[in-house]
Amino acid sequence: MSKNKVAIITGATGGIGFEVARTLGKKGYTVILNGIEDEAGAKRVEELKSEGINAEYYGFDVTNETEVTSNINKIGEKYGKIDVLVNNAGGLGGRSRFEEMTTEFYRFVMALNLDSVFFASRAAIPFLKKGEHPSIINYTSNAAWNAGGPGAGIYGTSKAGVHAITRALAKDLAEYGIRVNAVSPGTIDTPFHQQIKSTKPEVFASWANNIMLGRLGQPEDVAGVVAFWQVRTLLSSQQKQSKLVVDRH
């Protein structure tokens, strides 16, 4: 794999995002972690550096268009390119049934899960065009298909939007060689489920019964999928290039 590959991972100060950063970092990427908790971000960067990974932290709110655009421009200009954008930031945002749902809550959840993908992808595209086998990786959810449980309907709606924008971006960017894919995790044991884990541990534990492996997913499971797809594509391309060289001789 080529050196000096650059990956931006939003929402990467914990959970799945941090494991994705660590996994890509171990594959030789310079990883740029994003978050809104600067102290946690600094600690995570030091943790990665102690493992020999090149890492930086940029604190900005992915729902803020100006902040997203400004910071991704800074990263792209510093490195001259972006090879991978992982739109990991997102969340439930709380629970609300539609009858009681405020417009503010609706807009917040949509901004957190869908607007953030649009803002970051749009800002990164000029730099992805300069990358090596560039790609955007988004996260959908089971809720995109089943609309989520009671109170999580707008979360499911926003994730269905991510599913659609992933396909739309893939069509829009194919001519530039920029791949766009989505990962759809099942139930992953992260702080995302902390509330129900602490208030209804028996319900949380019962979720594993509906999974054939008999256990909940772990952040590293998702990170492995992201890394496998990215690295496999690079290796496949390198093998094709090697074959061309052999054939020409």
Image: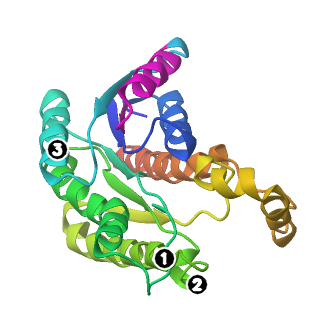
Q: To which residue does mark 1 refer?
A: 156
Horizontal side of 162 relative to 131 (left or right) equals right
Q: What stretch is highlighted in magenta?
A: 32-49
- Can residue 178 be seen in the rendering of this structure? no
Label 1: element kind: helix
Q: Position of residue 180 (x, y in %)?
A: 35, 63
**Of 107 and 76, which appears nearest the observer?**
107
- Tag 2–tag 1 contact (CB < 8 Å): yes
Distance Cα–Cα, label 1 vs label 3? 26 Å
Give the main secondary structure of the magenta stretch: helix
**Of 5 and 235, which appears nearest the observer?**
5
Single out the residue that lies furthest toward the front: 100
* Location of residue 175 (image quadrant): bottom left
Quick check: 249 above or below 32? below
Label 2: element kind: helix
Judge the density around disc 2: few (<14), some (14-19), many (≥20) Cα neighbours within 10 Å.
few
- Tag 3–tag 2 contact (CB < 8 Å): no
Q: What residue type is labelled 3?
A: Glu
The colour mode here is rainbow
Q: To which residue does mark 2 refer?
A: 146
Q: Which amino acid does label 2 sit on?
A: Asn
**Residue at 83% across, 59% down:** 205
Q: In the rendered structure, find residue 67 and report the number of the disc placed on it.
A: 3
* Location of residue 135 (image quadrant): bottom left
Label 3: element kind: helix
**Residue at 52% across, 41% down:** 20
Quick check: 236 above or below 152? above
Q: Where is residue 242 in the image (x, y as percent from the top left)?
A: 42, 43
